[in-house]
Amino acid sequence: MSTPRRRPARDAELLAGSVRAFAARGYFGTSTAQVAAEMGVSQPYVIRTFGSKLELFVRTHAFAAAEIVTVFRAATSDGFDGDRLGAAYRALVLSDTAALLVWAHAFSAATAEPVIGAESRRQFDEIYRVLRDTGASDEELWAFMGRGMLMNNLLLMQAPRFADDYDFAPLVELVFGARPPASLPPGASGAPAPHQE
């Protein structure tokens, strides 16, 4: 049975719903029925359109990761600049935490699901190549990507929201500048101006 042909815009709309669904509970904690509800379609439609839950998650992860690649490509048009890239990445992850959560869920599922592991490594390699092709050295990439991983971890544990309850509040302030709100409206970056990097 062949998969029905869909318009790319419809694919993007469906995958955006899938990102929201998987962001909440990850690969193992999310059913295709929950994804279908977030997409606004039936569960049989999800399976017919995307195949298995595993195939859907891999497509969802690729969709979320493509946003990171797009942001990095735009921010590296004039070559590698860690501050400019950092500001662009910070704006992205603060405005679209669901994509960040899918990325993190993929990493955590990678050891249990080899297909997700392969896709996670492929996506990470694509980001590495985009950044390396700007002329950055591996040492510069190590420093830049390490800062990005710190941002990710702080956001994943909701550190900005709860920083005042812990001794690490100064680190959150250093990483994010003005403390981002606990919940950002769609499209809001919450990132400090580039001169605050």
Image (cartoon, helix red, strand yellow):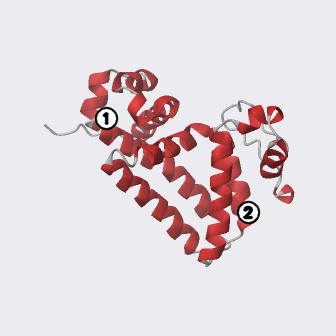
SS state under label 1:
helix
Quadrant of the snapshot with the C terminus: bottom right
Determine if residue 6 is in view: no
Quarter-of-image position of residue 100: top right
Query: Residue shown at 75%/32% (left/top)?
Result: 161
Q: Which amino acid does label 2 sit on?
A: Arg
User: In the figure, is residue 176 to the left or right of 143?
Assistant: right
In this rendering, the count of numbered labels is 2
Disc 2 crowd, CA 10 A, few/some/many (<14, 14-19, 20+) = some
Q: What residue type is labelled 1?
A: Lys
Q: Where is residue 30 in the image (x, y as percent from the top left)?
A: 41, 28
* Residue 53, numbered label: 1
The residue that label 2 is drawn on is 84
Most distant residue in the left direction: 1
Q: Where is residue 178 in the image (x, y as percent from the top left)?
A: 85, 43
Q: Position of residue 186 (x, y in %)?
A: 66, 33
Q: Position of residue 167 (x, y in %)?
A: 82, 41
